[in-house]
C-alpha cells in the first residue's frame, strides 16, 4: 500500500487542501496517509478533517497522525513537507525590522536579500534532519517540499542529501491564471512554457487557443485598470520582453529598480489595502483559516471539499497511475538552461510518469532574462555555502550581492546589518552559536 507522509500537516494554508487532493483521487484514496506536526492541537484538527473527509467521500484510506517524525517517515513512498522555518513570522519580522533600519525595505523578505538569506539559514537544520531521517527510514521516497527561498533550499538539500527532492511553488500556475484573467480567457484554453529561477521565471510562451497571446497582453498593459494591478511585472515585461512569475509586490524586491525610496515604492508597489505589515495580514489569514477548519473538523456539518491547484499530489498521482503530468519544479541545472550556471537551482517544466520526474530541456534563455537570473543565482550560491558550511562571511557576501541591498547600502553597512541579524536571530540559528 502506498504511504504518503505530510510533514506540517497542521498547516492552515496547506493541510486541508493536500488532504482533500489525496482523498478525492480514486487512485490515491486507498493509501496510508500519515499526518505529522509538532503542534498537537493543529495535528488533531488535521486528523479529524482527514477522517471526516474520508468518510464523506467513502475513501478507504488508512489515516494515522503522530508528533513523531520518524514514525511518520518510516516506510514512506512520498513525503510532502510544508513546515515553517524556525521562528516563523516573528523571526521574519526581526529580519524586516533590521533590514529597514539600514534602508532596505523588503516587500516580504522570503526569497532574496537579508530576509531570504537568513530564512535559508533558519530552514536548514530541520530540513536536513528530515532528509537524514528519510535516508534511514525511506531512502527511495520522493521529497516534495514547500520552503521559501525555493532556490536556496532545494539547492542546498540536493548537495547535502541523497534523497530525491524537488522544491515546490505555485507561482507559475497562479501567474498563468492571472494572465488568463487579464485577457478574459478561460484558463483551460491557455498554455504556458515557463523557465528561469523561482519567483523570477519567465513566460517564454503564453498562448490562448494555440496562438501567441503576447500581443494581447501588450494591449492589456495599456489599459490603466489592468496596469495598476501589476505595475512591476508590466514594467519588467516592457523593458525585458517577458512576463514574470510571482506578484508585482514580491517582484519589486528582487531587482534594484522599484524600492530604493518611499516614492518609488508608492509608485510601483504600494502596500495593498493600507496594510502596513504583510506578516500580520498573513498571520491573521492563518488564524481565520484554522478556526474555520476547526469548526469543520469537529462540527456537525459536512466538510466543504475544494481541491487545491498545487502540483504535489498531481505528481504523486502520475507516478502511481502512469498518467503523464506536467508541472514546474525547482531542480538542479544539469544542462537544462544552458546559459545559467551548471549545478544551480532552476525552475523548469517537468514531466512525470511511473518512471519518475523528468525535467525538460530549455536551452538558452533570452540573454536579458538570463542576466537577471544570474544576478539572483550569484547570491543564492553564497547563501547555500553559508547554510551548509556555517560560514558567516558567505552569508554577508550573499546579502551584499542582493541587487536591492547593493543599491542602498555600503559594504560596511551590510557588514553591520548582517552582524545585527545574526545576534537578533541567534535563538533560531543554534548551529552558528
Image (tube, rainbow, N blue to C red):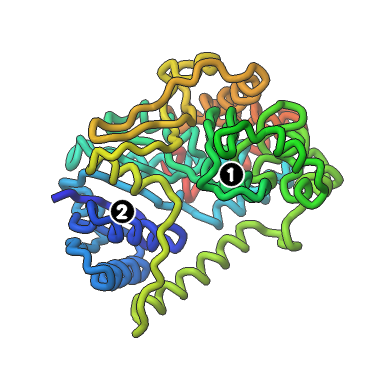
x and y percentages locating residue 30 in the rendered image? 18, 57
Task: Give the Cα separation between the discs numbered 2 and 1.
Answer: 26 Å
In the displayed structure, 93 sits above or below 202; it is: below
**Res 237 quadrant in image:** top right
x and y percentages locating residue 226 in the rendered image? 75, 49
Residues packed near mark 1 inside 10 Å, few (<14), some (14 to 19) or many (20 plus): some
Horizontal side, residue 346 vs residue 238: left or right: left
SS at badge 2: strand
Check if mark 2's residue and mark 1's residue have beta carbons within 8 Å: no
The numbered mark at residue 64 is none
Residue farthest bottom in this picture: 300
Residue situated in front as seen by the camera: 375 or 357: 357
Q: Quadrant of the C terminus?
A: top left
Residue located at (75% from left, 36% from top):
218
| Closer to viewer: mark 2 or mark 1 | 1
Residue situated in front as seen by the camera: 228 or 257: 228
Residue located at (50% from left, 54% from top):
88
Please name the residue that numbered disc 2 is placed on: 6
Residue situated in front as seen by the camera: 106 or 344: 344
In the displayed structure, 280 sits above or below 402; it is: below
The numbered mark, 2 or 1, whose residue comes first in the sequence reads 2
Residue situated in front as seen by the camera: 100 or 298: 298
Residue farthest left in this picture: 1
Please name the residue that numbered disc 1 is placed on: 175
Horizontal side, residue 414 vs residue 428: left or right: right
x and y percentages locating residue 24 in the rendered image? 30, 60
x and y percentages locating residue 419 in the rendered image? 61, 38
Residue located at (19% from left, 41% from top):
138
Horizontal side, residue 190 vs residue 273: left or right: left
What count of labels does the image hold?
A: 2
In the displayed structure, 270 sits above or below 233; it is: below
Amino acid at each position: 500500500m502506498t504511504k504518503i507522509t505530510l510533514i506540517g500537516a497542521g498547516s492552515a494554508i496547506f493541510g486541508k487542501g493536500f488532504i482533500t487532493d489525496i482523498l478525492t483521487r480514486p487512485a490515491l484514496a486507498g493509501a496510508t496517509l500519515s499526518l505529522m506536526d509538532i503542534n498537537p492541537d493543529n495535528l488533531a484538527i488535521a486528523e479529524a478533517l482527514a477522517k471526516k473527509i474520508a468518510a464523506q467521500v467513502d475513501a478507504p484510506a488508512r489515516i494515522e497522525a503522530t508528533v513523531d517524525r520518524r514514525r511518520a517517515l518510516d516506510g514512506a513512498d512520498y513525503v510532502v513537507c510544508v513546515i515553517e522555518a524556525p521562528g516563523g513570522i516573528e523571526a521574519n519580522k526581526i529580519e524586516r525590522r533590521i533590514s529597514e533600519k539600514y534602508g532596505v525595505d523588503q516587500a516580504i523578505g522570503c526569497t532574496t536579500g537579508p530576509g531570504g538569506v537568513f530564512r535559508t539559514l533558519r530552514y536548514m537544520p530541520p530540513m536536513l534532519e528530515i532528509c537524514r531521517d528519510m535516508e534511514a527510514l525511506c531512502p527511495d521516497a520522493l521529497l516534495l517540499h514547500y520552503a521559501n527561498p525555493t532556490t536556496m533550499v532545494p539547492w542546498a538539500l540536493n548537495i547535502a542529501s541523497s534523497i530525491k527532492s524537488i522544491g515546490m511553488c505555485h507561482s507559475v500556475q497562479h501567474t498563468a491564471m492571472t494572465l488568463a484573467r487579464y485577457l478574459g480567457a478561460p484558463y483551460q484554453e491557455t498554455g504556458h512554457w515557463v523557465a528561469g529561477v523561482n519567483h523570477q521565471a519567465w513566460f517564454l510562451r503564453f498562448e490562448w487557443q494555440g496562438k501567441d497571446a503576447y500581443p494581447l497582453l501588450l494591449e492589456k498593459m495599456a489599459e490603466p485598470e489592468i496596469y495598476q494591478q501589476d505595475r512591476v511585472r508590466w514594467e519588467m515585461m516592457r523593458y525585458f520582453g517577458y512576463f514574470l512569475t510571482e506578484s508585482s509586490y514580491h517582484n519589486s524586491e528582487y531587482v534594484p529598480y522599484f524600492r530604493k525610496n518611499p516614492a518609488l515604492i508608492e509608485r510601483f508597489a504600494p502596500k495593498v489595502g493600507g496594510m502596513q505589515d504583510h506578516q500580520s495580514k498573513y498571520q491573521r489569514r492563518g488564524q481565520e483559516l484554522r478556526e474555520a477548519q476547526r469548526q469543520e473538523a469537529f462540527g456537525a456539518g459536512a466538510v466543504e471539499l475544494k481541491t487545491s491547484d498545487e502540483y504535489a499530489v498531481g505528481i504523486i498521482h502520475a507516478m502511481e497511475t502512469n498518467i503523464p503530468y506536467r508541472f514546474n519544479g525547482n531542480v538542479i541545472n544539469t544542462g537544462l538552461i544552458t546559459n545559467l550556471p551548471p549545478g544551480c537551482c532552476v525552475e523548469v517544466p517537468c514531466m512525470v510518469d511511473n518512471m519518475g520526474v523528468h525535467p525538460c530541456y530549455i536551452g538558452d534563455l533570452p540573454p536579458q532574462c538570463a542576466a537577471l537570473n544570474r544576478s539572483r543565482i550569484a547570491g543564492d550560491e553564497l547563501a547555500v555555502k553559508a547554510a551548509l558550511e556555517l560560514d558567516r562571511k558567505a552569508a554577508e557576501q550573499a546579502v551584499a550581492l542582493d541587487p536591492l541591498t547593493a543599491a542602498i547600502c555600503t559594504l560596511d553597512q551590510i557588514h553591520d546589518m548582517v552582524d545585527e541579524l545574526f545576534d537578533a536571530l541567534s535563538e533560531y540559528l543554534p548551529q552558528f552559536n
